[in-house]
Image: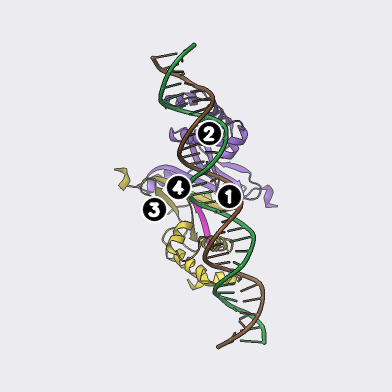
Chain colours: A yellow, B purple, C brown, D green
Amino acid sequence: MENLIEIVKGSGAKLTSPRKKVLEKLYHSELPLTLKEIHNECKDIDFASVYRTIKLFNEIGLVDEITFADKKIRYELVSNLHNHHIICSNCGEIEKVPICFVSEIKKITKYKITKHTLEFMGLCPNCQN
Amino acid sequence: MENLIEIVKGSGAKLTSPRKKVLEKLYHSELPLTLKEIHNECKDIDFASVYRTIKLFNEIGLVDEITFADKKIRYELVSNLHNHHIICSNCGEIEKVPICFVSEIKKITKYKITKHTLEFMGLCPNCQN
DNA sequence: TTGCCAATTGCAAGCTATTTGCAATTGGAA
DNA sequence: TTCCAATTGCAAATAGCTTGCAATTGGCAA
């Protein structure tokens, strides 16, 4: 956490109370969060500020943006372990998938890959019944 | 194409002229298309009708929905060869990636996978200069 | 420690993309 | 050919994202 705060300061941005709060939510979350989810957890912060804070964090390389299979965009700390996810189409539960194939892709294309999305949707064990 | 028309009819839906036109655009497109792109190609069809047509096609399992790394949602015929894509963050060019890892994922999760997204963004060979 | 100023925030409004209600139109079964 | 439910086009509503601006605040300089 101290580390993250240094990254914000190091970028030249002010460490304001809204920014600190958003950073903490991301830090304590197991899973990537939508803007709405972050805002719900920090009702005292204006939505526009959450939006601009995440935009800043993304620009300084602190958070990544992930589009899940439910079409919702979520955000997570880059420093978190990189994971992909399965979301249940019925109950919305999200499970991590501990696997990633970017290196394989890099071998077969001449593009310089900067971002990738690998997300799944399906029925979780519970909802299959 | 005849085959696709049968799927529409078989679902109980009417084969109207807007639907036929949208189906043809999808059929003749090398790459998945956004709603806007489809509408641009069929200016005589109302946007709402394109929207509802694609929604129908998706519901009857005729088209798949793909969220690219540029956050835009695109649609392609399910019967088309299944492909993933890299989009250039600079010029927007799209390249197919002839690889897919769904079967590997199926082995390591108890979810019943119904949808997946595997999209990349980066710089194409041209834009790397 | 205090004052100051650029950076940041909250509010409200403006986008853009998506979705819906409804009267007019149309495909295709009888 | 007629008829009716399904479908369309139009227009308006909704939702999510983005921005302008006056008020507020973090943190540097005195």
State how many labels appear.
4
Circle 4 crowding by C-alpha within 10 Å: few under 14, some 14–19, many from 20: some
* Image depth: mark 3 or mark 4 in front: 4
Q: Main secondary structure of the magenta part?
A: strand
Circle 2 crowding by C-alpha within 10 Å: few under 14, some 14–19, many from 20: some
At label 4, the amino acid type is: Asp
Tag 3 near tag 4, CB within 8 Å? no
The answer to whether marks 2 and 3 sit on the same chain is no
Q: Position of residue B9 (x, y in %)?
A: 45, 24
Q: Which residues are magenta?
A: A62-67
Disc sitting over residue A95 in the figure: 3
Q: Position of residue B7 (x, y in %)?
A: 45, 26
Query: What residue is pinned by disc 2?
Result: B49
Alpha carbons under labels 2 and 3: distance apart? 36 Å
Tag 2 near tag 4, CB within 8 Å? no
Chain letter of the residue beneath label 2 in the structure image = B
Determine which quarter of the picture holds residue B41: top right
At label 3, the amino acid type is: Glu
Q: Report helix, strand or loop for mark 1.
A: strand
Chain letter of the residue beneath label 3 in the structure image = A
Disc sitting over residue B121 in the figure: 1
Disc sitting over residue A70 in the figure: 4
* Image depth: mark 2 or mark 3 in front: 2
At label 2, the amino acid type is: Ser
The answer to whether marks 3 and 1 sit on the same chain is no
Tag 3 near tag 1, CB within 8 Å? no
Magenta stretch encompasses residue A66: yes
Chain letter of the residue beneath label 4 in the structure image = A
Circle 1 crowding by C-alpha within 10 Å: few under 14, some 14–19, many from 20: many
Q: Report helix, strand or loop for mark 2.
A: helix
- Mark closer to the chain start, 3 or 4: 4
Question: Does residue A74 appear to the left or right of A90 in the view shown?
Answer: right
